[in-house]
Amino acid sequence: MTIELTIELIALLFFVAVVAGFIDAIAGGGGLLTIPALMWAGLPPTAALATNKLQACGGSFFASLYFVRKGLVNLADMKLSIACAFVGAALGTIAVQMIDTAFLEVMLPFLILGIGAYFLFSKKISEEDKHQVFTPAVFAFTAALGVGFYDGFFGPGTGSFFALAFVSLAGYGLAKATAHAKVLNFSTNIASLTFFAIGGKVFWMLGAIMLVGQAIGATLGSRLVVTKGTKIIKPLVVTMSIAMSVKLLSAQYDLFFWM
């Protein structure tokens, strides 16, 4: 299948990617914009998901790079979690080809709403680090591996799940949790992209165009995480949690395209 790349299509996909990268760097949920845009451009669902992983790699990489440079993330301390997230996503990508995801379609909207409620009402959400529940090794083999598997298996809300894990289990402040979540999300994106590429599902030209837009949006969004912290992260996480839940519930009734 081939896609005619007109100037109008390129401009639209680039703009969508910029906005999605900005949102993803702060709260996640950019796929609400990019996947429907790719399907509108003419890609079948599987190819849209695969190509979306390519452009998402750009956003998560540049956001992660910015957070590392600003000192919010020490990669040396995250090696085990990064590896576990990668392995989890790889296993999830394999498993999704063999297991029915119908049960997740029913449960997920309510889980994501729960995340939004947690960020809205929990007193643990602040800029300050709190009590650490899991050691880094335990966190890697539970939260990083588990959420990584979920991202490869299903996907929506992965950044929010990672951020929630860092806040509630690692005891991180919100900006620090968001920064670390983006690093693990880059790892899972790379794992999923690898398996999609092996299957020949990626539209590289479209993905590359959107990757550039994602890089710009992610850089702008990550700067706001550093400068504004909880003031911008908390309301946007709640908003995107509601938006993702509505989208997923609507998809069950065939009102919107499936993410």
Image (spheres, grey):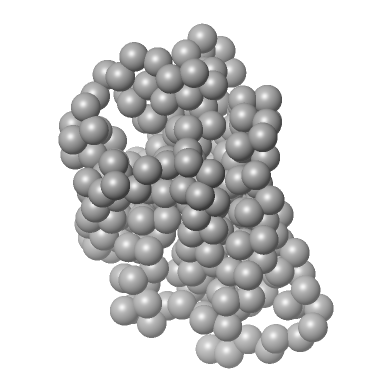
Q: Residue 125 vs residue 16: left or right?
A: left
Q: Residue 12 vs residue 174: left or right?
A: right
The residue located at (67%, 35%) in the rendering is 227
The residue located at (37%, 77%) in the rendering is 197
Tell me if residue 130 comes above or below residue 61 in the rendering: above
Tally of numbered tags: 0
Q: Is residue 50 visible?
A: yes
Q: Residue 85 vs residue 197: left or right?
A: left
- Picture coordinates of residue 259 (x, y %)? 53, 55
- Front in this rendered view, residue 253 or 194: 194
Q: Can residue 246 be seen in this view?
A: no
Q: Which residue lies furthest to the top in this view?
A: 123
- Picture coordinates of residue 170 (x, y %)? 33, 26
- Picture coordinates of residue 252 (x, y %)? 52, 45
The quarter holding residue 231 reads top right
Q: Which residue lies furthest to the right in this view?
A: 8
- Front in this rendered view, residue 8 or 124: 124
The residue located at (42%, 55%) in the rendering is 186
